[in-house]
Image (cartoon, rainbow, N blue to C red):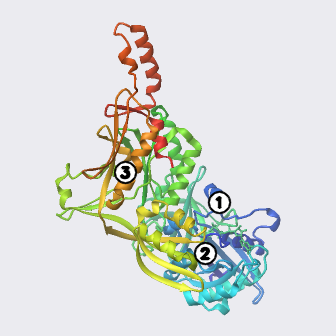
Amino acid sequence: IPIERYRNFCIVAHIDHGKSTLSDRLLEHTGTISASDGNKQILDKLDVERERGITVKAQTCTMIYRYAHDGHDYLLHLVDTPGHVDFRAEVTRSYASCGGALLLVDASQGVQAQTVANFHLAFAEGLTLVPVINKIDLESADVGRALEQIEVAFELDPTKAVKVSAKTGVGINGILPAVIQNIPPPVGDPNKPLRMLLVDSWYDTFRGVVLLVRVFDGQVRAGDKLVSFATGNQYTVGEVGIQYPNQVPQTTIRAGQVGYIFFNPGMKRIQDAKIGDTFTNVGCEGVVEPYPGFEEPKPMVFVAAFPTDQSHYQKLADSIGQLVLNDRSVTLQKDSSEALGAGWRLGFLGSLHCSVFQDRLRQEHGADVIITEPSVPTKLEYADGTELVITNPAEFPEPSEDHRMRSAKIFEPVVRATVALPEDYYGKVIELLEAARGTNEGIEFFGNQVIMKYEIPAASLVDDLFGKLKGATKGYATLDYEDAGWRESDLVKLNLLVNKVAVDAIARIVHRSQAVRLGRAWVEKFKQHVSRQMFEIIIQAQAGRQIVARETLKPFRKDVLAKLHASDISRRRKLLERQKEGRKKLRAVGNVVIEQSSFQKFLSK
Ligand code: GTP
C-alpha cells in the first residue's frame, strides 16, 4: 500500500464520551477483531486502565480498510491517546504522530472541559478535525445542541459531522470514509535516512523496553543500528512490526507508518525511552534533523512512603521498584524522616497519577505502609537572584535557620484550569474556585453550558478540587488543566510539634490564610490518634514562627513505673521485654514515643 493511502488518526474526546467503544467498533468494522471476540476495549491494555476505566497510555492499532468509493485498500493507524490530563505530554506526542483526529462529542452531554482542552492541543499540532457526535441512541441525546456547540466553540462545519452510536453501531460506516476524505495522508520519504519519533513505550519482561514509534522518513528493519538523539545510546533493532491488534512482526516499517520496535539486546531501563525522542541510523546524526524537543516528565505532586515496620523495608522497596518499572513518569528517590525512618519520596505528574499509584501500593501492603499527604513543589528566589526548588516540605528553610529567607520571594506552581458545567451551578462553582484561591480569566456561555477559565494554585488541585467540584454540581462539572508556571504567593511552612519537636514528615507548605484552620484540624486529629503516656504531651501547630493551634494530652493518672520499687527486678524486666516487642513499631519524636499506626491513622482521610 503506497503512502498516499495511509491515514494516521486519533480520537479527541472528553472522558466517557465513548472513545474506547468507538475504537472497538472501528476495529470490528474493518475485521481487525471479530465482533464475537468479547474483546472489549482492546486498546486499554494496562491494568490500571481497566481498573479505573480510563486510558493512561497511548496505544495504537493498525487496520486495513477497503474504501468502496475507489476500490483501494487503505492502511489506517488509530492511535489511542490517554484520556486524563495528568498525561498531557503523552497526549501531545500521540497527536504529533497523526494527521488528523475524530473530535468525539457525547450527544447527551455536549462539549465538556476535556473536549475543549484536547481540541486546543490537537489544533496546535495542526491536526485536521472530523466532528463525530456519539450516543445518538440515548433518549437524552440532543444532537442539534452538540452540533451548535462544535460550531460556536471550535468553528467546525456541523454539516461535516458524522452522527453515530458506538454502542449499537448505527452510523459507524460513515466514519472511515470521512477519515479518508478529510484527513491528509502522511508525507515522508522512505529513501532518506531514518527519522523516527518515539511516541510511547512499555516494559516487557522478555523483550526489554518496547517502543511505539512513528517513522517520518526512511525505514527500519531488524539488524539496523540506531542512535537516540536524546541519550546518544546506540541499539541494534531486534524486531519491528505493527499492532494488528496484537504485535505482528513485519520486515520493515516505513515512512508514514506507526509501529512497534524492540532491540536486541533489549533496552533495559524505561527511563532511556524518552517520549518525543528522535532515533536515526548510526552515522546519520549529522544530516537528520531531530523532531523538535522532548519533554522530561515533570513531577507536580510528591508524596513520601515509609514502611510501618522498618524490617519490611526491603519488601516495600521491591514492590515500589516494580511499580516504577513500567511508569517512566514516576520519579523515585530515597528519603528519611526522623519520625518515620527510612523510606522514599515519589514524584507524579498529577493527583490522579499519584492516587492510582497510592491505591496500588495500599492494595499490596495495606497496613504496612505510611504515605504522607501529597504536596506540590515550592520555589524560592533569594535577593541575589539564586533560585531553589523544594519538593520536600521538610527542607523548606525556616527564617531562623536561613537569614536569606527574610528577603526571599516564594512562588507556588499554578495551573490554567478549564471547568465546564451546567449554568444552574454557576454561582456555587464560582464560590468554590474563589475559595481555592483561583483567579478568573474568562467565562463563555453557550446554550445552558458554561465554560470558565481559572488560574488556580496546583496545591488546590491536589487538595481534591475536582472532588469538591463534582460534589457541588451533582457530578456534572468537568475539569481540565494545563501547567501555567509559577506565581508569587504568601506561603508558610506548617509544622506539627510534639512536645516542641517538629514531626518532619508531616510538615506542609500552605498559604498563610489557611494556616490557622489547617493547624487546628491537625492538632485535634493528632490528639485522637496518640496514646497517653506517663507525662503530658503538648501538640502544637506552628506556621512560620507562630503557634497557631495547641492541644494537650493529659498523662495517665497513675504512673505505673513510679510505683515499681527499684529492687523489683523481675517485674521490671518483664515490662522492658514487653516494650521491646513493641519497639519495632514505635518511633520517638523528641522524648515522646509514638506508634507508627498513629501516624498512619493521622495521615489517612
Ligand atoms: P476513557 O477511555 O476513560 O477516556 O473513556 P471513553 O471515552 O473511552 O469511554 P468508553 O468508550 O469507555 O464509554 C463510556 C461509556 O459510554 C461506556 O459505559 C459505554 O458503554 C458508553 N457508550 C459509548 N458509546 C455509546 C453510545 O453510542 N451509546 C450509548 N448509549 N452508550 C455509549
Q: Nearer the viewer, residue 301 or 193?
A: 301
Q: Helix or strand or loop: what does disc 1 sit on?
A: loop
| CB under 8 Å between discs 1 and 2 | no
Q: Nearer the viewer, residue 566 or 166?
A: 566
Which quarter of the figure has residue 415? Answer: bottom left
Q: Nearer the viewer, residue 271 or 297?
A: 297
Residue 346, image x, y percentages? 44, 51
Tell whether circle 3 marks a residue whose Cβ is less than 8 angstroms from ligand 1. no
Q: Which residue bears the numbered disc 2?
A: 13
Whether residue 404 is situated above or below residue 168 in the rendered picture = above
3 or 2: tag closer to the N-terminus:
2
Instruction: Kindly identify the amino acid type of the residue bearing the numbered disc 3.
Output: Gly
Please tell me how crowded label 3 is: few (under 14), some (14-19), or many (20+) other residues with Cα within 10 Å.
many
Which quarter of the figure has residue 178? Answer: bottom right
Whether residue 558 is situated above or below residue 356 in the rendered picture = above
Residue 239, image x, y percentages? 61, 60
3 or 1: tag closer to the N-terminus:
1
53 vs 275, left or right, is: right
Q: Which residue bears the numbered disc 3?
A: 519
Q: Residue at x 41, y 71 (%)?
A: 438
Q: Helix or strand or loop: what does disc 2 sit on?
A: strand
Q: Which residue bears the numbered disc 1?
A: 45
Instruction: Kindly identify the amino acid type of the residue bearing the numbered disc 2.
Output: Ala
1 or 2: tag closer to the N-terminus:
2
